[in-house]
Image (cartoon, rainbow, N blue to C red):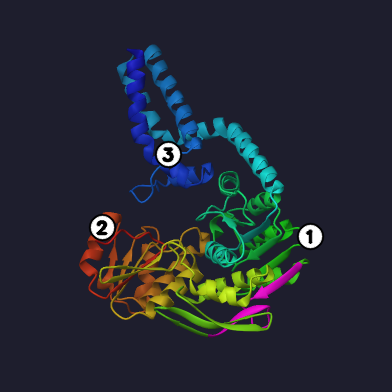
């Protein structure tokens, strides 16, 4: 009976703890962040994200189940009072976050050893490959610039690129070990949430070339200051080989600052005094046209990508492609056929409704650009957003300003975040937005219901930092 009792309790525990497992995984296995969210009960409810049963998660679950089983088995054998058993069961339910932390600590040496093994293996594999290695980092536009560069380089090279937003050390490692074959070029997106993250990746990738995109106040909650962000992004510059080349997107003061102190061969873009820039830009709901200037060579180009931020990404990627021997004519052809990056100002249509999916651009610059694009459309405009997260102390002011900017463009607003709703609401009202046209949704079901009532033929829905549901 002891085994039956223990197994039954463990099964109940797993069902109860599922939401904690998902939160732990969505926090990137960051135990400090997980425990903080658990204390505030900001857990990953809803079905937007599922628990992914990775090898690491399976290891975690096995140890978790083992600990819980041992606990309940001992209770059944040595605690004879039914009252005490019930009390202890209640306590372990309440202390689920503590158990998760305990399992994390127990597995930490194992996870570090496994991670180190695969990173070294990836570094050795990449070192043996006779290919051009490119690193891309920045606060905004990393993924879009990476995808644009890959599409242009494919005019002449075979290219392997880290997929989607695989921009951690293990994401890059996984790409090298599973995807890299006989390609001529390897492009690695390098993200960071704290100092040293990019240095780790650059150390085993050893880039020949690099791109630093726009830098701004992204992930301030973990970085603490813009200076720390700048220093972390500069780790890629330091990691590029001594005879390597770095291209800087000059659309932000921070990137220009890093450009000015870089001692290696470097090129500035998106500045009329720089190596490459765009002029006579014309943007509408169908895309953009502009003159692309690289090293005094000029061509007129057109693209279906939306917004000025994408033009800057195109200019920066084109500059590096040109340095790698891609002709201006091939660059023009590639730009014409560029495909948008998923969830980053991606235009979709569902029946007679236009959808602007900007759900992965959780930053101030991207949101402002998305609203500019939204304003270029005719018809009723609806913005769905949870606001900005991970901005630390600047979050309240940023969300207030976002609410005000949305009010200048939208006809209706749907707010999806309890934390930011008052700031977004206050910002919108400060610009005389009708409070009756602001709605709140706590989950996908409520969001779908509101959109079903608000959408009309020809209307445009912008999902800003929020994944859209399928329209039918």
| Residue at (69% x, 62% y) in the render | 209
In terms of secondary structure, where does tag 1 sit? loop
Is residue 441 depicted above or below 280 in this figure? above
Residue drawn at (42%, 39%) of the image: 21
x, y (%) of residue 466? Answer: 39, 60
Q: Which residue is mark 1?
A: 242
Residue holding disc 2: 446
Percent of width and height locating residue 237: 71, 61
**Occupied quadrant, residue 448:** bottom left
Position of 319 with respect to 33 (left or right) is right
Question: Residue 140: in sight, yes or no?
Answer: no
Q: Work out which quarter of the rendered image holds the N terminus and state it.
A: top left
Crowd band around label 1 with a 10 angstrom C-alpha radius: few (<14), some (14–19), many (20+): few
Closer-to-camera residue (376/29): 376
Earlier sequence position, callout 2 versus callout 1: 1
Report the disc number at residue 21.
3
Give percent across and percent down for residue 75.
Answer: 39, 17
Image position of 356 with respect to 233: above or below:
below
Judged from this view, the residue extending furthest toward the left is 453
Q: Nearer the viewer, mark 1 or mark 3?
A: 1
Task: Find out whether residue 267 is within the magenta segment.
Answer: yes
The part of the image, by quadrant, that contains residue 360 is bottom left
The magenta-colored residue range is 265-280
Secondary structure beneath disc 3? helix
Work out whether residue 17 can be spotted: yes
**Residue nearer the viewer, 464 or 400:** 464
């Amino acid at each position: 009976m002891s085994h039956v009792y223990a197994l039954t309790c463990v099964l109940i525990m797993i069902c109860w703890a599922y939401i904690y497992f998902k939160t732990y995984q969505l926090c990137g296995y960051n135990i400090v962040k997980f425990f903080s969210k658990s204390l505030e009960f900001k857990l990953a409810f809803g079905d937007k994200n599922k628990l992914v049963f990775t090898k690491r998660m399976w290891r975690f679950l096995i140890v978790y189940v083992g600990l819980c089983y041992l606990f309940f088995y001992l209770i059944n054998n040595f605690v004879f009072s039914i009252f005490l058993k019930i009390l202890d069961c209640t306590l372990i339910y309440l202390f689920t976050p503590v158990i998760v932390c305990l399992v994390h600590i127990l597995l930490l040496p194992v996870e570090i050893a496994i991670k180190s093994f695969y990173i070294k293996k990836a570094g050795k594999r990449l070192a043996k490959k006779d290919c051009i290695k490119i690193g891309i980092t920045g606060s905004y536009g990393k993924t879009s610039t990476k995808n644009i560069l890959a599409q242009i380089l494919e005019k002449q090279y075979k290219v392997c690129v880290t997929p989607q937003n695989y921009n951690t050390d293990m994401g890059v490692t996984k790409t090298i070990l599973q995807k890299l074959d006989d390609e001529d070029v390897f492009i690695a997106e390098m993200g960071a949430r704290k100092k040293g993250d990019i240095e780790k990746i650059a150390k085993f990738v050893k880039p020949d070339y690099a791109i630093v995109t726009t830098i701004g106040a992204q992930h301030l909650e973990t970085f603490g200051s813009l200076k720390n962000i700048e220093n972390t992004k500069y780790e890629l510059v330091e990691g590029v080989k001594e005879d390597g080349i770095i291209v800087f997107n000059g659309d932000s003061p921070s990137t220009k600052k890093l450009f000015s102190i870089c001692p290696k061969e470097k090129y500035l873009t998106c500045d009329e005094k720089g190596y490459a820039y765009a002029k006579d830009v014309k943007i509408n709901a169908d895309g953009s046209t502009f003159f692309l200037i690289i090293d005094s060579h000029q061509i007129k180009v057109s693209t279906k990508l939306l917004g000025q931020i994408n033009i800057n990404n195109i200019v920066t990627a084109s500059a590096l492609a040109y340095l790698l021997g891609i002709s201006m004519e091939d660059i023009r052809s590639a730009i014409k056929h560029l495909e948008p990056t998923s969830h980053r100002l991606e235009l979709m249509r569902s029946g007679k409704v236009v959808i602007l999916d900007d759900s992965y651009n959780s930053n101030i610059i991207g949101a402002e650009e998305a609203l500019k694009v939204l304003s270029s459309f005719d018809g009723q405009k609806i913005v769905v957003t949870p606001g900005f997260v991970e901005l630390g102390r600047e979050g309240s002011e940023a969300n207030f300003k976002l609410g005000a900017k949305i009010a200048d463009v939208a006809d209706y607003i749907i707010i999806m975040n309890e934390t930011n709703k008052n700031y977004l609401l206050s910002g919108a009202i400060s610009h005389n937005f009708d409070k009756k046209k602001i709605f709140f949704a706590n989950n996908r079901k409520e969001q779908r219901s509101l959109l079903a009532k608000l959408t009309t033929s020809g209307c445009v829905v912008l999902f800003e930092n929020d994944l859209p549901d399928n329209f039918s």
